[in-house]
Amino acid sequence: MASVSTHYDTHLGPVYSWMLGDPTAADQRAVADIESLELQVIPQGIAVDLGAGTGLHSLLLARRGYLVTAIDSCEALLDELRARSAGLPITAVKGDLLAFPQIVPGAIDVILCMGDTLTHLPDLRSVEVLFAAVAASLAGGGTFASTFRDYSRAAEGTSRFIPVRSDADRILTCFLEYFADRVMVHDLLHERIDGHWRLRVSAYPKLRLGTAWVTERLQEQGLQVRTGARPNGMVQVIATKL
């Protein structure tokens, strides 16, 4: 079993952009994510994108006038973000998500944690620590938004096998293995190299977060919370500091 950072550095990071599929469709999904937040227009507002990856959401926030700090543990993904963000007010930082208050001190207008990043934290206590830091860091009227998969109910049988993407030279399949508080994600990557198919397998743990639990923990921090559904089985949680 690999850690989350090792799994992305050695296994998913090199194929992550391919995994997202058609770039135009991926950009459109990100636009829909941002529009669903109904953010106020804040010229030179401060935004933090936790688990920013290649920067789909960071780029959109920057184009809306935000000064964005994009934090991720995978340098390869951040390099892609940097290449795409030339001329935009985005600072890409390799770091621990829980350390964001030290990376961006002061009041923050928007904090994002999208694309199942929340389940990558090591334990439930780390999620609670993150939420406390979010509540302390948000400016009045500020927004925290997260999308994640609700793993509280275990998938069964063949529904545990998820075809992620395939083309003539690459096939990525995911298999989920459930435990009490975690789900083990096995990523099976077949690649055609020099005319021969080769299989690489890596597995890493995700937290079995539930929508109700996440909502309650955010409300305990004094945040106003609303939830909804996003494409690809994602749950959306939006929390506002009044």
Image: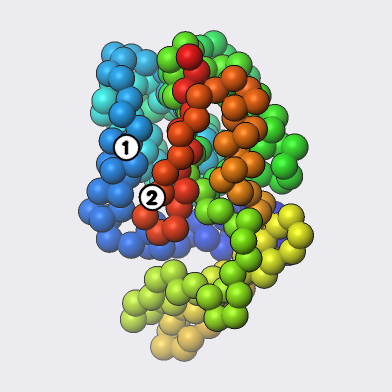
Name the secondary structure under disc 1.
helix
Instruction: From the image, tell me which residue sits under label 1.
Output: 36
Q: Is residue 89 above or below residue 36?
A: above
Residues marked 1 and 2 touching at CB (< 8 Å): yes
- Residues at marks 1 and 2, CA–CA distance in whole angstroms: 10 Å
- Within 10 angstroms of label 1, few (less than 14), some, or many (20 or more) residues? few
**x, y (%) of residue 140?**
47, 11
Count the labels in the image. 2
- Foreground residue among 134 and 151: 151
Is residue 118 in sight in this rendering?
A: yes
Circle 2 sits on which residue? 230
- Which residue is at the front of the view, 237 or 201? 237
Q: Earlier in the sequence, mark 1 or mark 2?
A: 1
Numbered disc 2: secondary structure: strand
Q: Amino acid at mark 2?
A: Arg
User: Is 57 displayed left or right of 156 in the figure?
Assistant: left
On the image, the x and y values in percent for residue 91 come to 44, 27
